[in-house]
Amino acid sequence: GDSVTQMEGPVTLSEEAFLTINCTYTATGYPSLFWYVQYPGEGLQLLLKATKADDKGSNKGFEATYRKETTSFHLEKGSVQVSDSAVYFCALSVISGGYQKVTFGTGTKLQVIP
Amino acid sequence: NAGVTQTPKFQVLKTGQSMTLQCAQDMNHNSMYWYRQDPGMGLRLIYYSASEGTTDKGEVPNGYNVSRLNKREFSLRLESAAPSQTSVYFCASSEPDSYGYTFGSGTRLTVV
């Protein structure tokens, strides 16, 4: 079946450091790829997405590129802020039986210290 | 601009008690989902409803039932709560396209 593997956390960075969170996937079809962010006490929010190979999703300074050849979708940000502290989930989706079937990774907690 | 609304936000149950978690969306989405989130295990799908009038089991359906009351509402029922059902429950909705899910803010359930 489909699966998503992301690096285990927690990841602790100083403010303004460069962030990379690795994500790889296996899928039988041709999935769309997503990053979701979860702030403490809240639900998941869609951060960015990419729907085909070589697409780059971007939002709020975060970027990720859909790499079909390496089945990866790594999340990057050039300069993190304390407000970026959250849990980040990589996910893939395929359309199956008329609905969007989503598979999530286990999440990576990011802590940014001043 | 409510999106997906879940009630209640917090609940404590005794073992064996029953309760219903409510979820409503105002985006006219066809599909709705219930997930549970546990430490170290990410999100696991309990039940989903691809469209109004249909429901199907997800990865961890045992101990739960669902009702798709109408296009807007999708409820999750615990008939006889167990401590293993202590978790944070999230409702989500989507269209059958590639634009991702919209999540509610969650219900934190503790079964003692």
Image (cartoon, rainbow, N blue to C red):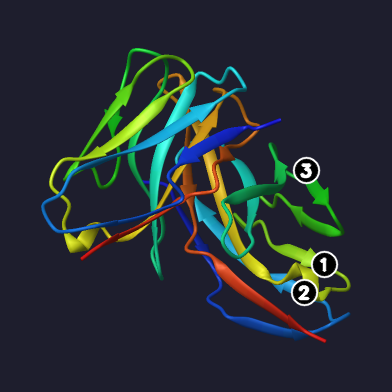
- Of mark 2 and mark 1, the one earlier in the sequence is 2
Tell me if residue B78 can be seen: yes
The picture places residue A107, in percent across and down from the top left corner, at 53, 65
* 2 and 1 marks in contact (CB < 8 Å): yes
Left or right: B54 in relation to A94? left
Q: Position of residue B57 (x, y in %)?
A: 26, 34
Which residue is disc 2 drawn over? A19
Q: Is residue A5 above or below residue B102?
A: below
**Chain at numbered mark 3:** A
**First along the sequence among labels 1 and 3:** 3
Q: Splitting the image into 4 quarters, where does residue B97 fall?
A: top right
Q: Secondary structure at mark 1?
A: strand
Q: CA distance from mark 2 to mark 1?
A: 5 Å
Amino acid found under the numbered disc labelled 1: Lys
Measured as percent of width and height from the top left, residue A8 is found at 53, 76
Mark 1 crowd level (few <14, some 14–19, many ≥20, 10 Å Cα): many
| Residue in the picture at 78% in, 65% down | A76
- Measured Cα–Cα span from mark 3 to mark 2: 20 Å
Circles 3, 2 touching at the beta carbon (< 8 Å)? no
Q: What is the chain letter for disc 1? A: A
